[in-house]
Image (tube, grey):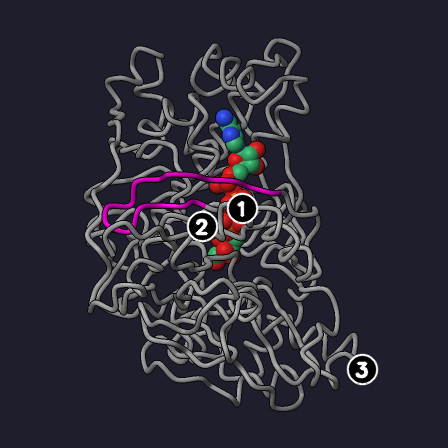
Amino acid sequence: MAGSLVAGVDSSTQSTKVVLCRAEDGAVVAQASAPHPGGTECHPGHWWNALREVREVLERADAVAVAAQQHGMVALDGAGEAVRPALLWNDTRSAPQARALVAELGGAESWAGRTGSVPVASFTVTKLRWMAENEPGNARRTERVMLPHDWLTLRLGAPEPVTDRGDASGTGYWSPASGAYLPDLLRAALGHDAEPPRVAGPGERVGETAWGAALGPGTGDNMGAALGLGLRPGDVVVSIGTSGTAFAVSGEPAADPSGLVAGFADATGRFLPLVCTLNAARILSAAAAMTGATLAELSALALAAEPGAGGVTLLPYLDGERTPDRPGATGVLAGLTTANATRENVARAAVEALLCSLADAVDHLAAQGVRPRRTLLIGGGARSAAVRTLAPAIFGTPVTVPEPAEYVALGAARQAAWALAGTPGPPAWPAPPATEHATEHAAEHASDRAGPDVRARYAALRDSAPQIRGGFP
Ligand SMILES: Nc1ncnc2c1ncn2[C@@H]1O[C@H](COP(=O)(O)OP(=O)(O)O)[C@@H](O)[C@H]1O
Ligand SMILES: O=C(CO)[C@@H](O)[C@H](O)COP(=O)(O)O
Protein backbone atom coordinates (compact mmCIF):
# COMPACT_ATOMS: atom_id res chain seq x y z
CA MET A 1 0.00 0.00 0.00
CA ALA A 2 2.75 2.48 0.91
CA GLY A 3 3.51 4.57 -2.17
CA SER A 4 0.40 3.30 -4.00
CA LEU A 5 -2.04 5.66 -5.71
CA VAL A 6 -5.79 5.07 -5.90
CA ALA A 7 -8.38 6.76 -8.12
CA GLY A 8 -12.03 7.43 -7.37
CA VAL A 9 -14.50 8.36 -10.07
CA ASP A 10 -17.77 10.26 -9.61
CA SER A 11 -19.81 9.80 -12.79
CA SER A 12 -22.69 12.05 -11.76
CA THR A 13 -25.51 13.71 -13.63
CA GLN A 14 -23.64 16.70 -15.01
CA SER A 15 -20.04 15.49 -15.21
CA THR A 16 -17.35 12.90 -14.54
CA LYS A 17 -14.82 13.78 -11.85
CA VAL A 18 -11.76 11.79 -10.89
CA VAL A 19 -9.48 12.23 -7.87
CA LEU A 20 -6.11 10.50 -7.53
CA CYS A 21 -5.10 9.95 -3.90
CA ARG A 22 -2.32 8.46 -1.85
CA ALA A 23 -3.62 5.07 -0.68
CA GLU A 24 -2.27 5.42 2.84
CA ASP A 25 -3.93 8.71 3.84
CA GLY A 26 -6.21 9.88 1.01
CA ALA A 27 -4.18 13.01 0.22
CA VAL A 28 -5.24 14.20 -3.25
CA VAL A 29 -2.36 14.36 -5.73
CA ALA A 30 -4.33 15.09 -8.92
CA GLN A 31 -7.87 15.57 -10.15
CA ALA A 32 -9.73 16.18 -13.41
CA SER A 33 -13.27 16.45 -14.75
CA ALA A 34 -15.20 16.27 -18.01
CA PRO A 35 -18.81 17.28 -18.74
CA HIS A 36 -21.76 15.04 -19.64
CA PRO A 37 -24.46 16.01 -22.12
CA GLY A 38 -27.60 17.60 -20.62
CA GLY A 39 -31.01 15.97 -20.53
CA THR A 40 -32.61 13.12 -18.63
CA GLU A 41 -31.48 10.30 -20.88
CA CYS A 42 -27.93 9.56 -21.93
CA HIS A 43 -26.21 6.94 -24.03
CA PRO A 44 -23.74 5.17 -21.69
CA GLY A 45 -21.03 5.77 -24.30
CA HIS A 46 -21.01 9.46 -23.25
CA TRP A 47 -20.00 8.46 -19.70
CA TRP A 48 -17.22 6.31 -21.16
CA ASN A 49 -16.03 9.18 -23.37
CA ALA A 50 -15.98 11.51 -20.34
CA LEU A 51 -13.95 8.91 -18.43
CA ARG A 52 -11.51 8.70 -21.34
CA GLU A 53 -11.09 12.48 -21.18
CA VAL A 54 -9.72 12.13 -17.62
CA ARG A 55 -7.64 9.02 -18.33
CA GLU A 56 -4.26 10.71 -17.81
CA VAL A 57 -5.13 11.03 -14.12
CA LEU A 58 -7.05 7.73 -13.91
CA GLU A 59 -4.33 5.57 -15.43
CA ARG A 60 -1.77 6.62 -12.82
CA ALA A 61 -3.75 4.64 -10.24
CA ASP A 62 -2.90 1.22 -8.77
CA ALA A 63 -6.59 0.75 -7.90
CA VAL A 64 -9.83 2.33 -9.17
CA ALA A 65 -13.48 2.39 -8.11
CA VAL A 66 -16.44 4.15 -9.71
CA ALA A 67 -19.31 5.84 -7.88
CA ALA A 68 -22.10 7.13 -10.12
CA GLN A 69 -25.55 8.67 -10.26
CA GLN A 70 -28.02 6.13 -8.85
CA HIS A 71 -30.98 4.41 -10.51
CA GLY A 72 -30.18 5.00 -14.25
CA MET A 73 -31.62 2.20 -16.41
CA VAL A 74 -28.90 0.70 -18.63
CA ALA A 75 -30.76 -1.98 -20.62
CA LEU A 76 -28.47 -4.27 -22.65
CA ASP A 77 -29.20 -6.77 -25.40
CA GLY A 78 -27.61 -10.22 -25.78
CA ALA A 79 -24.50 -8.67 -27.36
CA GLY A 80 -24.06 -6.26 -24.44
CA GLU A 81 -25.21 -3.21 -26.47
CA ALA A 82 -27.54 -0.64 -24.93
CA VAL A 83 -31.03 -1.08 -26.44
CA ARG A 84 -31.70 2.66 -25.94
CA PRO A 85 -30.10 5.61 -24.12
CA ALA A 86 -30.12 5.15 -20.34
CA LEU A 87 -33.10 6.73 -18.59
CA LEU A 88 -31.67 8.74 -15.69
CA TRP A 89 -32.83 9.21 -12.08
CA ASN A 90 -34.20 12.67 -12.93
CA ASP A 91 -36.41 11.48 -15.80
CA THR A 92 -40.01 11.61 -14.60
CA ARG A 93 -41.76 9.94 -17.55
CA SER A 94 -42.28 6.70 -15.60
CA ALA A 95 -44.36 8.37 -12.84
CA PRO A 96 -47.63 6.71 -13.96
CA GLN A 97 -45.85 3.33 -14.12
CA ALA A 98 -44.49 3.88 -10.58
CA ARG A 99 -48.01 4.38 -9.29
CA ALA A 100 -49.32 1.39 -11.20
CA LEU A 101 -46.55 -0.91 -9.92
CA VAL A 102 -47.15 0.13 -6.31
CA ALA A 103 -50.89 -0.45 -6.67
CA GLU A 104 -50.52 -3.77 -8.54
CA LEU A 105 -47.92 -5.35 -6.31
CA GLY A 106 -49.15 -5.06 -2.77
CA GLY A 107 -49.22 -1.30 -2.09
CA ALA A 108 -46.72 1.05 -0.45
CA GLU A 109 -46.29 -0.94 2.76
CA SER A 110 -45.41 -4.10 0.90
CA TRP A 111 -42.88 -2.32 -1.36
CA ALA A 112 -41.26 -0.59 1.63
CA GLY A 113 -41.06 -3.93 3.46
CA ARG A 114 -39.63 -5.84 0.49
CA THR A 115 -37.33 -3.29 -1.16
CA GLY A 116 -36.80 -0.69 1.60
CA SER A 117 -38.45 1.99 -0.59
CA VAL A 118 -41.71 2.89 -2.28
CA PRO A 119 -40.65 3.44 -5.89
CA VAL A 120 -41.21 6.79 -7.61
CA ALA A 121 -40.23 7.69 -11.17
CA SER A 122 -36.50 7.75 -10.29
CA PHE A 123 -36.27 4.05 -9.54
CA THR A 124 -34.98 1.62 -12.19
CA VAL A 125 -37.94 -0.73 -11.79
CA THR A 126 -40.42 1.97 -12.90
CA LYS A 127 -38.28 2.80 -15.95
CA LEU A 128 -38.35 -0.87 -16.99
CA ARG A 129 -42.14 -0.83 -16.86
CA TRP A 130 -42.19 2.40 -18.90
CA MET A 131 -40.03 0.74 -21.56
CA ALA A 132 -42.17 -2.42 -21.56
CA GLU A 133 -45.29 -0.33 -22.18
CA ASN A 134 -43.88 2.23 -24.59
CA GLU A 135 -41.02 0.47 -26.38
CA PRO A 136 -41.96 -3.22 -26.34
CA GLY A 137 -39.30 -4.07 -28.94
CA ASN A 138 -36.55 -2.61 -26.75
CA ALA A 139 -37.97 -4.37 -23.71
CA ARG A 140 -38.03 -7.73 -25.55
CA ARG A 141 -34.38 -7.31 -26.60
CA THR A 142 -33.27 -6.53 -23.02
CA GLU A 143 -31.32 -9.42 -21.49
CA ARG A 144 -29.39 -7.55 -18.80
CA VAL A 145 -30.18 -4.50 -16.70
CA MET A 146 -27.34 -2.53 -15.17
CA LEU A 147 -26.78 0.81 -13.44
CA PRO A 148 -24.36 3.55 -14.54
CA HIS A 149 -21.59 2.53 -12.13
CA ASP A 150 -21.96 -1.19 -12.94
CA TRP A 151 -21.70 -0.48 -16.64
CA LEU A 152 -18.56 1.64 -16.22
CA THR A 153 -16.98 -0.97 -13.91
CA LEU A 154 -17.62 -3.64 -16.56
CA ARG A 155 -16.08 -1.45 -19.28
CA LEU A 156 -13.07 -0.80 -17.07
CA GLY A 157 -12.31 -4.51 -16.94
CA ALA A 158 -14.53 -6.41 -14.48
CA PRO A 159 -14.73 -9.98 -15.86
CA GLU A 160 -18.50 -10.17 -15.20
CA PRO A 161 -21.30 -7.66 -14.53
CA VAL A 162 -21.02 -6.66 -10.89
CA THR A 163 -22.67 -4.11 -8.63
CA ASP A 164 -22.70 -3.37 -4.89
CA ARG A 165 -25.31 -3.24 -2.11
CA GLY A 166 -25.57 0.55 -2.24
CA ASP A 167 -26.48 0.88 -5.90
CA ALA A 168 -28.54 -2.35 -5.95
CA SER A 169 -30.73 -0.81 -3.24
CA GLY A 170 -31.89 1.90 -5.68
CA THR A 171 -33.20 -0.50 -8.31
CA GLY A 172 -36.53 -1.40 -6.69
CA TYR A 173 -35.88 -5.14 -7.19
CA TRP A 174 -33.29 -5.86 -4.47
CA SER A 175 -33.87 -6.17 -0.75
CA PRO A 176 -31.45 -4.29 1.52
CA ALA A 177 -32.76 -6.25 4.52
CA SER A 178 -32.11 -9.73 3.05
CA GLY A 179 -29.38 -8.85 0.54
CA ALA A 180 -31.20 -10.76 -2.22
CA TYR A 181 -32.70 -9.81 -5.58
CA LEU A 182 -36.47 -9.88 -5.96
CA PRO A 183 -36.77 -11.30 -9.50
CA ASP A 184 -40.57 -11.29 -9.39
CA LEU A 185 -40.53 -7.47 -9.24
CA LEU A 186 -38.08 -7.15 -12.13
CA ARG A 187 -40.16 -9.58 -14.18
CA ALA A 188 -43.40 -7.79 -13.38
CA ALA A 189 -41.87 -4.52 -14.58
CA LEU A 190 -40.06 -5.67 -17.73
CA GLY A 191 -42.45 -8.43 -18.76
CA HIS A 192 -39.77 -11.15 -18.67
CA ASP A 193 -36.65 -12.11 -16.70
CA ALA A 194 -33.40 -10.26 -17.19
CA GLU A 195 -30.09 -10.81 -15.47
CA PRO A 196 -28.99 -8.22 -12.91
CA PRO A 197 -25.29 -7.96 -11.95
CA ARG A 198 -23.80 -9.97 -9.08
CA VAL A 199 -23.78 -7.97 -5.84
CA ALA A 200 -20.15 -7.83 -4.67
CA GLY A 201 -19.15 -7.53 -1.03
CA PRO A 202 -18.02 -4.13 0.30
CA GLY A 203 -14.34 -3.61 -0.47
CA GLU A 204 -14.16 -6.73 -2.69
CA ARG A 205 -11.60 -6.73 -5.49
CA VAL A 206 -13.80 -7.39 -8.53
CA GLY A 207 -11.26 -7.35 -11.35
CA GLU A 208 -8.43 -5.49 -12.97
CA THR A 209 -8.24 -2.63 -15.46
CA ALA A 210 -6.45 -2.84 -18.81
CA TRP A 211 -3.41 -1.11 -17.24
CA GLY A 212 -3.33 -3.60 -14.33
CA ALA A 213 -5.03 -1.60 -11.55
CA ALA A 214 -7.25 -3.37 -9.02
CA LEU A 215 -10.97 -2.63 -9.42
CA GLY A 216 -13.22 -1.97 -6.43
CA PRO A 217 -16.94 -2.80 -6.73
CA GLY A 218 -17.99 0.88 -6.93
CA THR A 219 -21.29 2.20 -5.58
CA GLY A 220 -23.98 4.87 -5.94
CA ASP A 221 -22.85 8.47 -5.63
CA ASN A 222 -24.54 9.14 -2.28
CA MET A 223 -22.99 5.99 -0.80
CA GLY A 224 -19.67 7.20 -2.19
CA ALA A 225 -20.06 10.53 -0.40
CA ALA A 226 -20.87 8.73 2.88
CA LEU A 227 -17.64 6.71 2.54
CA GLY A 228 -15.62 9.78 1.52
CA LEU A 229 -16.79 11.68 4.59
CA GLY A 230 -16.32 8.71 6.92
CA LEU A 231 -19.89 9.15 8.21
CA ARG A 232 -20.70 8.05 11.75
CA PRO A 233 -24.11 7.49 13.35
CA GLY A 234 -25.53 10.93 14.30
CA ASP A 235 -24.08 12.64 11.21
CA VAL A 236 -26.69 13.82 8.70
CA VAL A 237 -25.35 14.87 5.31
CA VAL A 238 -27.18 17.43 3.21
CA SER A 239 -25.77 17.32 -0.32
CA ILE A 240 -26.56 20.05 -2.84
CA GLY A 241 -25.68 18.68 -6.27
CA THR A 242 -27.93 18.25 -9.30
CA SER A 243 -30.09 16.38 -6.80
CA GLY A 244 -30.56 17.44 -3.22
CA THR A 245 -30.09 14.62 -0.74
CA ALA A 246 -30.23 14.20 3.02
CA PHE A 247 -28.91 10.93 4.41
CA ALA A 248 -27.35 9.19 7.40
CA VAL A 249 -25.72 5.83 8.08
CA SER A 250 -27.65 3.35 10.17
CA GLY A 251 -27.19 -0.16 11.50
CA GLU A 252 -30.79 -1.06 10.65
CA PRO A 253 -32.60 -1.10 7.31
CA ALA A 254 -35.32 1.56 6.87
CA ALA A 255 -38.78 0.87 5.44
CA ASP A 256 -40.88 4.04 5.20
CA PRO A 257 -44.32 3.30 3.71
CA SER A 258 -44.89 7.03 3.11
CA GLY A 259 -42.16 6.77 0.46
CA LEU A 260 -40.48 9.98 1.62
CA VAL A 261 -37.39 8.16 2.93
CA ALA A 262 -35.69 5.62 0.67
CA GLY A 263 -34.22 2.71 2.65
CA PHE A 264 -30.94 2.31 0.78
CA ALA A 265 -27.88 0.27 1.75
CA ASP A 266 -24.45 1.90 2.09
CA ALA A 267 -21.05 0.86 0.72
CA THR A 268 -19.71 -0.62 3.97
CA GLY A 269 -22.32 -3.23 4.93
CA ARG A 270 -24.63 -0.81 6.78
CA PHE A 271 -27.72 1.10 5.62
CA LEU A 272 -28.29 4.62 4.28
CA PRO A 273 -31.80 6.05 4.75
CA LEU A 274 -32.01 8.91 2.25
CA VAL A 275 -34.37 11.62 1.05
CA CYS A 276 -33.79 12.94 -2.47
CA THR A 277 -35.12 16.05 -4.18
CA LEU A 278 -35.08 16.56 -7.92
CA ASN A 279 -34.26 20.26 -7.64
CA ALA A 280 -31.18 21.50 -5.83
CA ALA A 281 -28.09 23.35 -7.20
CA ARG A 282 -29.96 24.13 -10.41
CA ILE A 283 -32.42 26.26 -8.40
CA LEU A 284 -29.47 28.60 -7.93
CA SER A 285 -28.37 28.50 -11.57
CA ALA A 286 -31.97 29.16 -12.68
CA ALA A 287 -32.19 32.13 -10.28
CA ALA A 288 -28.83 33.37 -11.54
CA ALA A 289 -30.15 33.25 -15.11
CA MET A 290 -33.37 35.05 -14.06
CA THR A 291 -31.46 37.84 -12.34
CA GLY A 292 -28.71 38.10 -14.95
CA ALA A 293 -26.12 37.29 -12.28
CA THR A 294 -23.20 34.90 -11.95
CA LEU A 295 -23.45 32.35 -9.14
CA ALA A 296 -21.14 34.50 -6.99
CA GLU A 297 -23.26 37.60 -7.71
CA LEU A 298 -26.42 35.66 -6.88
CA SER A 299 -24.96 34.82 -3.49
CA ALA A 300 -24.08 38.48 -2.84
CA LEU A 301 -27.58 39.58 -3.95
CA ALA A 302 -29.20 37.05 -1.60
CA LEU A 303 -27.10 38.21 1.33
CA ALA A 304 -27.99 41.83 0.58
CA ALA A 305 -31.75 41.13 0.93
CA GLU A 306 -33.69 40.95 4.18
CA PRO A 307 -34.59 37.52 5.62
CA GLY A 308 -37.87 36.40 4.08
CA ALA A 309 -37.04 38.15 0.78
CA GLY A 310 -39.54 40.95 1.45
CA GLY A 311 -42.40 38.43 1.19
CA VAL A 312 -41.27 36.72 -2.04
CA THR A 313 -41.41 32.91 -1.82
CA LEU A 314 -40.24 30.40 -4.39
CA LEU A 315 -41.63 26.87 -4.68
CA PRO A 316 -38.61 25.40 -6.46
CA TYR A 317 -40.14 22.42 -8.30
CA LEU A 318 -38.60 23.56 -11.58
CA ASP A 319 -38.16 20.09 -13.07
CA GLY A 320 -41.13 18.46 -11.36
CA GLU A 321 -40.33 17.09 -7.89
CA ARG A 322 -39.57 13.73 -6.29
CA THR A 323 -39.96 14.65 -2.60
CA PRO A 324 -42.80 15.44 -2.33
CA ASP A 325 -43.84 13.19 -5.22
CA ARG A 326 -45.03 15.77 -7.78
CA PRO A 327 -43.45 14.69 -11.05
CA GLY A 328 -45.51 17.10 -13.14
CA ALA A 329 -45.01 20.20 -10.97
CA THR A 330 -43.45 23.47 -12.09
CA GLY A 331 -41.93 26.28 -10.03
CA VAL A 332 -43.97 29.11 -8.53
CA LEU A 333 -42.72 32.56 -7.52
CA ALA A 334 -45.31 33.94 -5.10
CA GLY A 335 -45.87 37.13 -3.15
CA LEU A 336 -44.47 39.59 -5.70
CA THR A 337 -45.46 43.26 -5.41
CA THR A 338 -44.07 46.40 -7.08
CA ALA A 339 -42.32 47.13 -3.78
CA ASN A 340 -40.53 43.81 -3.35
CA ALA A 341 -39.80 42.81 -6.97
CA THR A 342 -36.02 43.20 -6.76
CA ARG A 343 -33.12 41.03 -7.92
CA GLU A 344 -32.01 40.78 -4.29
CA ASN A 345 -35.36 39.36 -3.16
CA VAL A 346 -35.54 36.88 -6.05
CA ALA A 347 -32.00 35.69 -5.23
CA ARG A 348 -32.85 35.42 -1.54
CA ALA A 349 -36.09 33.55 -2.25
CA ALA A 350 -34.13 31.02 -4.36
CA VAL A 351 -31.59 30.31 -1.60
CA GLU A 352 -34.34 30.13 1.04
CA ALA A 353 -36.40 27.77 -1.14
CA LEU A 354 -33.47 25.44 -1.71
CA LEU A 355 -32.77 25.30 2.02
CA CYS A 356 -36.45 24.91 3.01
CA SER A 357 -36.82 21.99 0.63
CA LEU A 358 -33.76 20.32 2.19
CA ALA A 359 -34.89 21.16 5.75
CA ASP A 360 -38.08 19.25 4.91
CA ALA A 361 -35.86 16.35 3.78
CA VAL A 362 -34.02 16.35 7.14
CA ASP A 363 -37.40 16.38 8.94
CA HIS A 364 -38.48 13.30 6.96
CA LEU A 365 -35.32 11.48 8.10
CA ALA A 366 -36.01 12.51 11.69
CA ALA A 367 -39.57 11.16 11.39
CA GLN A 368 -37.98 7.77 10.60
CA GLY A 369 -35.90 7.87 13.77
CA VAL A 370 -32.68 9.47 12.50
CA ARG A 371 -31.42 11.68 15.34
CA PRO A 372 -29.07 14.28 13.86
CA ARG A 373 -26.20 15.34 16.13
CA ARG A 374 -24.38 17.11 13.31
CA THR A 375 -25.50 18.41 9.89
CA LEU A 376 -22.80 18.32 7.19
CA LEU A 377 -23.30 20.42 4.06
CA ILE A 378 -21.57 19.26 0.86
CA GLY A 379 -21.95 19.36 -2.95
CA GLY A 380 -21.51 22.11 -5.52
CA GLY A 381 -24.29 24.25 -3.99
CA ALA A 382 -22.44 24.33 -0.65
CA ARG A 383 -19.80 26.45 -2.40
CA SER A 384 -22.32 29.32 -2.29
CA ALA A 385 -21.60 31.71 0.61
CA ALA A 386 -25.31 32.56 0.83
CA VAL A 387 -26.25 28.88 1.20
CA ARG A 388 -23.66 28.36 3.95
CA THR A 389 -24.70 31.55 5.76
CA LEU A 390 -28.47 31.01 5.68
CA ALA A 391 -28.45 27.25 6.31
CA PRO A 392 -28.23 27.32 10.15
CA ALA A 393 -31.27 29.58 10.51
CA ILE A 394 -33.40 27.57 8.08
CA PHE A 395 -32.30 24.17 9.45
CA GLY A 396 -32.54 25.46 13.03
CA THR A 397 -29.18 23.84 13.88
CA PRO A 398 -25.50 24.65 13.49
CA VAL A 399 -24.10 23.37 10.21
CA THR A 400 -20.69 21.83 9.55
CA VAL A 401 -19.23 22.56 6.12
CA PRO A 402 -16.35 20.21 5.21
CA GLU A 403 -13.85 21.98 2.97
CA PRO A 404 -15.14 21.94 -0.63
CA ALA A 405 -13.99 18.69 -2.25
CA GLU A 406 -15.28 15.90 -4.46
CA TYR A 407 -16.53 13.68 -1.62
CA VAL A 408 -18.23 11.15 -3.92
CA ALA A 409 -15.01 10.61 -5.86
CA LEU A 410 -13.02 10.54 -2.61
CA GLY A 411 -15.31 7.82 -1.28
CA ALA A 412 -14.76 5.80 -4.44
CA ALA A 413 -10.99 6.30 -4.03
CA ARG A 414 -11.22 5.11 -0.42
CA GLN A 415 -13.08 2.03 -1.62
CA ALA A 416 -10.36 1.43 -4.24
CA ALA A 417 -7.73 1.63 -1.47
CA TRP A 418 -9.79 -0.86 0.54
CA ALA A 419 -9.96 -3.30 -2.39
CA LEU A 420 -6.20 -2.89 -2.94
CA ALA A 421 -5.37 -3.56 0.71
CA GLY A 422 -7.76 -6.50 1.03
CA THR A 423 -8.47 -5.54 4.66
CA PRO A 424 -11.80 -6.20 6.44
CA GLY A 425 -12.63 -2.48 6.58
CA PRO A 426 -11.74 0.69 4.61
CA PRO A 427 -8.45 2.49 5.37
CA ALA A 428 -8.67 5.08 8.16
CA TRP A 429 -8.23 8.29 6.19
CA PRO A 430 -8.32 11.52 8.27
CA ALA A 431 -11.59 13.47 8.39
CA PRO A 432 -11.59 16.53 6.12
CA PRO A 433 -11.11 19.97 7.70
CA ALA A 434 -14.45 21.69 8.24
CA THR A 435 -15.87 25.05 9.30
CA GLU A 436 -18.76 25.39 11.74
CA HIS A 437 -21.61 27.75 10.88
CA ALA A 438 -23.95 28.64 13.73
CA THR A 439 -27.05 30.84 13.86
CA GLU A 440 -25.02 33.45 15.79
CA HIS A 441 -22.87 33.91 12.68
CA ALA A 442 -26.01 34.21 10.64
CA ALA A 443 -27.19 36.94 13.02
CA GLU A 444 -24.50 39.20 11.59
CA HIS A 445 -26.43 38.88 8.35
CA ALA A 446 -29.74 39.59 10.11
CA SER A 447 -31.00 36.06 9.42
CA ASP A 448 -31.03 34.54 12.87
CA ARG A 449 -34.66 34.52 13.85
CA ALA A 450 -36.19 34.43 10.40
CA GLY A 451 -35.87 30.67 9.86
CA PRO A 452 -39.20 29.53 11.33
CA ASP A 453 -41.14 32.31 9.53
CA VAL A 454 -39.48 31.54 6.22
CA ARG A 455 -40.22 27.83 6.62
CA ALA A 456 -43.86 28.50 7.54
CA ARG A 457 -44.39 30.69 4.47
CA TYR A 458 -42.67 28.10 2.29
CA ALA A 459 -44.81 25.29 3.76
CA ALA A 460 -47.99 27.28 3.10
CA LEU A 461 -47.06 27.68 -0.56
CA ARG A 462 -45.95 24.02 -0.82
CA ASP A 463 -49.30 22.85 0.55
CA SER A 464 -51.49 25.38 -1.26
CA ALA A 465 -53.83 25.21 -4.23
CA PRO A 466 -53.99 21.87 -6.09
CA GLN A 467 -53.54 23.59 -9.47
CA ILE A 468 -49.90 24.29 -8.60
CA ARG A 469 -49.24 20.91 -7.02
CA GLY A 470 -48.57 19.33 -10.38
CA GLY A 471 -48.86 15.70 -9.32
CA PHE A 472 -50.57 13.10 -11.47
CA PRO A 473 -54.18 12.62 -10.38
N1 LIG B 1 -20.31 28.65 -6.07
C1 LIG B 1 -21.43 28.00 -6.42
N2 LIG B 1 -22.64 28.49 -6.09
C2 LIG B 1 -23.77 27.83 -6.43
N3 LIG B 1 -23.80 26.68 -7.11
C3 LIG B 1 -22.62 26.13 -7.47
C4 LIG B 1 -21.38 26.75 -7.14
N4 LIG B 1 -20.39 25.96 -7.63
C5 LIG B 1 -20.99 24.92 -8.25
N5 LIG B 1 -22.33 25.02 -8.17
C6 LIG B 1 -23.34 24.11 -8.75
O1 LIG B 1 -23.17 22.80 -8.25
C7 LIG B 1 -23.64 21.85 -9.21
C8 LIG B 1 -22.65 20.73 -9.31
O2 LIG B 1 -22.51 20.19 -8.03
P1 LIG B 1 -22.07 18.69 -7.83
O3 LIG B 1 -22.15 18.39 -6.38
O4 LIG B 1 -20.76 18.49 -8.52
O5 LIG B 1 -23.26 17.98 -8.60
P2 LIG B 1 -23.35 16.61 -9.40
O6 LIG B 1 -22.54 15.65 -8.60
O7 LIG B 1 -24.80 16.32 -9.42
O8 LIG B 1 -22.81 16.86 -10.78
C9 LIG B 1 -23.83 22.60 -10.51
O9 LIG B 1 -25.23 22.72 -10.75
C10 LIG B 1 -23.19 23.95 -10.25
O10 LIG B 1 -23.87 25.01 -10.92
O1 LIG C 1 -31.45 9.71 -7.34
C1 LIG C 1 -30.63 10.07 -6.52
C2 LIG C 1 -30.62 9.48 -5.16
O2 LIG C 1 -31.65 8.57 -4.93
C3 LIG C 1 -29.65 11.12 -6.90
O3 LIG C 1 -28.95 11.61 -5.79
C4 LIG C 1 -28.73 10.61 -7.99
O4 LIG C 1 -27.85 9.63 -7.42
C5 LIG C 1 -28.03 11.72 -8.74
O5 LIG C 1 -27.06 12.35 -8.02
P1 LIG C 1 -26.25 13.69 -8.40
O6 LIG C 1 -25.86 13.67 -9.82
O7 LIG C 1 -27.09 14.84 -7.99
O8 LIG C 1 -25.04 13.59 -7.51
Determine the main secondary structure of the stretch shown in magenta.
strand
Q: In which quarter of the image is the N terminus?
A: bottom left
Say which quadrant the C terminus sits in.
bottom right
Q: Is residue 30 magenta?
A: yes
Q: Is residue 334 above or below residue 114?
A: above
| CB atoms of marks 3 and 1 within 8 Å | no
| Image position, residue 408 (x, y; %) | 41, 49
Residue, disc 1: 56
Looking at the picture, which amino acid does disc 1 mark?
Answer: Glu
How many residues crowd around disc 3 within 10 Å: few (fewer than 14), some, or many (20 or more)?
A: few
Name the element at disc 1: helix
Q: What stretch is highlighted in magenta?
A: 19-34
Tell me: residue 77, above or below residue 99.
below
Specify which label sits upstream in the sequence, 3 or 2: 2
Q: Who is closer to the viewer here, 199 or 286?
A: 199
Mark 2 and mark 1 in contact? Answer it, CB < 8 Å.
yes
Report the disc number at residue 109: none
For image coordinates 60% across by 90% down, the residue present is: 193
Q: How crowded is mark 1: few (under 14 residues within 10 Å), some or many (20 or more)?
A: few
Seen in the picture, residue 313 relative to 339 is either above or below; the reply is: below
Q: Which residue is drawn at 45% across and 60% down?
A: 220
Residue at 64 percent across and 64 percent down: it is 95
SS at mark 2?
A: loop
Mark 3 highlights which residue? 137
Is residue 374 on the magenta stretch? no
In the picture shown, does residue 392 fall above or below 42? above
Percent x, y of residue 377: 35, 37
- Label 3 to label 2, Cα distance in Å? 42 Å
Q: Can residue 288 be seen in this view?
A: yes
Name the amino acid type tagged 3.
Gly
